[in-house]
Image (cartoon, rainbow, N blue to C red):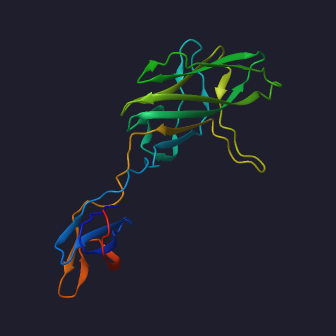
């Protein structure tokens, strides 16, 4: 709130701008032009953080037990500022800290307990301490493989245009990441679901109020205030100043 006090008989006017900020101005009689330039307090950061939700609806077989391969994501569901390039590179348009949550449908068709490892790489470089190891049970029968759904959570800070990939490798080619078809009452389960959400962001809000030179002008002919620009008069009264 902006307040100007004069040690004489004065008139008080209360005005509100189009942002809902109220300004009280006091001025002598007759008064000249009074310009209000007060701003409200800085508001909190906005809530429009970046996010992305991606899935893959194909079966992903393992090609090699000695070379890790990137998880593919061929469908974007909801995105804001995050996209997938080359079917595997989760790409960020803005710097910040992000939370990644992956859900994977992993299948073992072998008779043995098998090991599979998942880890992250940023801009093609493996991220230290990002690996998750999973041991898969053997198949149930010749015709019924073992299916397991596993989740992996990770957090990292990126710069603009950085990209992230989730790699995986197993000790047997009998491991696949499979899409589970719809059946009965349940819908299809994608082979992979990856959700990315920004948890720290650099956007800031603008201050409340206005600093556009809104003016209050005393009209001696009508003995009243006149408001310009976006100010709306709410109240006028005459008072005598007793102390300052």
From the viewer's perspective, is residue 195 above or below residue 144? Answer: below
Tell which of 238 and 141 is nearer to you: 238
Kindly tell me whether residue 75 is visible in this rendering: yes
From the viewer's perspective, is residue 51 above or below residue 112? Answer: below
* Total marks in image: 0
For the point 70% across and 42% down, the residue is: 181
For the point 69% across and 38% down, the residue is: 180
Give the percent coordinates (x, y) of residue 198: 48, 39
Give the percent coordinates (x, y) of residue 98: 49, 34
Tell which of 46 and 164 is nearer to you: 46
Kindly tell me whether residue 87 is visible in this rendering: no
**Which residue in the rendered view is the most extreme toward the right?**
141
For the point 41% across and 24% down, the residue is: 123
Give the percent coordinates (x, y) of residue 195: 56, 39
Tell which of 180 and 142 is nearer to you: 180
From the viewer's perspective, is residue 107 above or below residue 94? Answer: above
Image quadrant holding the N terminus, namely bottom left
Give the percent coordinates (x, y) of residue 84: 45, 37
On the image, which quarter does residue 244 sit in?
bottom left
Q: Left of 40 or right of it: where is 112?
A: right
From the viewer's perspective, is residue 49 above or below residue 214? Answer: above
Q: Left of 56 or right of it: where is 183?
A: right
């Amino acid at each position: 709130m902006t307040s100007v006090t004069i040690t004489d008989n004065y008139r008080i006017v209360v005005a509100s701008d189009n942002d809902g900020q109220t300004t009280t101005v006091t001025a002598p009689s007759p008064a000249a032009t009074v310009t209000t330039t007060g701003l409200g307090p800085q508001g909190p950061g906005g809530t429009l953080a970046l996010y992305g939700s991606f899935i893959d609806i194909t079966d992903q077989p393992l090609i090699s037990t000695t070379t890790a391969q990137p998880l593919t994501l061929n469908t974007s569901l909801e995105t804001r500022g995050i996209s997938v390039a080359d079917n595997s590179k989760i790409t960020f348009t803005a710097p910040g800290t992000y939370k990644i949550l992956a859900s994977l449908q992993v299948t073992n068709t072998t008779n043995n307990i098998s090991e599979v490892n998942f880890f992250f790489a940023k801009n093609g470089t493996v991220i230290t301490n990002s690996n998750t190891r999973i041991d898969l049970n053997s198949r149930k029968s010749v015709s019924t493989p073992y299916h397991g759904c596993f989740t992996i959570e990770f957090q990292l800070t990126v710069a603009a245009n950085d990209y992230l990939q989730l790699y995986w490798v197993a000790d047997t080619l009998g491991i696949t990441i499979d899409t589970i078809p719809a059946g009965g009452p349940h819908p299809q389960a994608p082979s992979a679901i990856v959700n990315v959400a920004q948890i720290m962001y650099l956007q800031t809000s603008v201050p409340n109020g206005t600093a556009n030179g809104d003016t209050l002008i005393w009209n001696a002919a009508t003995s009243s205030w006149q408001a310009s620009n976006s100010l709306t008069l709410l109240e006028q009264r005459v008072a005598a100043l007793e102390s300052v």
